[in-house]
Image (spheres, rainbow, N blue to C red):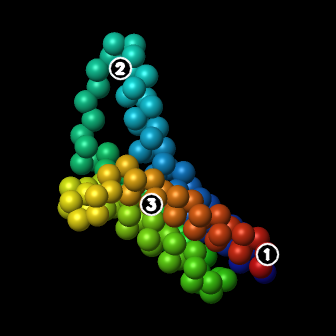
């Protein structure tokens, strides 16, 4: 049974690590660029690669929560993670149509997506902990 528990704990790290890396890829990069700019250093970042990294880590979080679903069978965290990953991806790749259709800015959609991913990861962790 210890092999199963260890394996499940590693799966939990995928979910939490994906959320953390997605947040760091998004806001950490902004912070570094801002700090360097304040020091007079200019750096060019390819927006497509940057957005791809953010979305890839959000999808890794979704996959990690999907692995947790196999264990606890609660669909709530998986649905919240799917919504969060979809919102993050939409903010990265479909900001103009979303803003035109809903009036919501890219940042609002992005923050809602990250909040949903964080809530899903915490919910998944709580279910795993009480299992």
Q: Is mark 3 on a helix, strand or loop?
A: helix
Find residue 41 and report its image quarter: top left
Q: What element carries label 1?
A: loop
Task: List x then y, in percent, for residue 27.
Answer: 45, 41
| Distance from the alpha carbon under mark 2 to that under mark 1 | 46 Å
| Distance from the alpha carbon under mark 1 to that under mark 3 | 26 Å
Q: Residue 113 carries which label?
A: 3
Residue at the spot x=51%, y=72% of the render? 80
Q: Depth check: 66 or 4 in front?
A: 66
Q: Which mark is residue 37?
A: 2
State the quadrant of the N terminus.
Answer: bottom right
The reply to whether residue 108 is visible in this rendering is yes
Left or right: where 115 falls relative to 108: right
Find residue 99 and report its image quarter: bottom left
Q: What element carries label 2?
A: helix
Q: Are marks 1 and 3 in contact (CB under 8 Å)?
A: no
Task: List x then y, in percent, for residue 78.
Answer: 53, 76
Determine which residue is flagged by label 1. 130
Residue at the spot x=50%, y=77% of the render? 79
Task: List x then y, in percent, for residue 60.
Answer: 46, 63
């Amino acid at each position: 049974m210890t092999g199963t528990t260890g394996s499940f704990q590693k799966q939990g790290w995928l979910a939490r690590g994906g959320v953390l890396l997605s947040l760091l890829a998004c806001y950490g990069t902004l912070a570094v660029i801002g700090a360097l700019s304040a020091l007079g250093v200019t750096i060019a970042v390819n927006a497509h690669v940057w957005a791809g990294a953010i979305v890839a880590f959000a999808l890794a979080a979704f996959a990690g929560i999907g692995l947790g679903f196999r264990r606890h069978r609660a669909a709530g965290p998986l649905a919240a993670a799917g919504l969060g990953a979809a919102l993050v991806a939409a903010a990265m790749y479909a900001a103009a149509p979303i803003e035109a259709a809903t009036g919501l800015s890219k940042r609002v959609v992005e923050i809602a997506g990250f909040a949903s991913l964080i809530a899903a990861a915490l919910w998944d962790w709580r279910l795993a902990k009480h299992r």
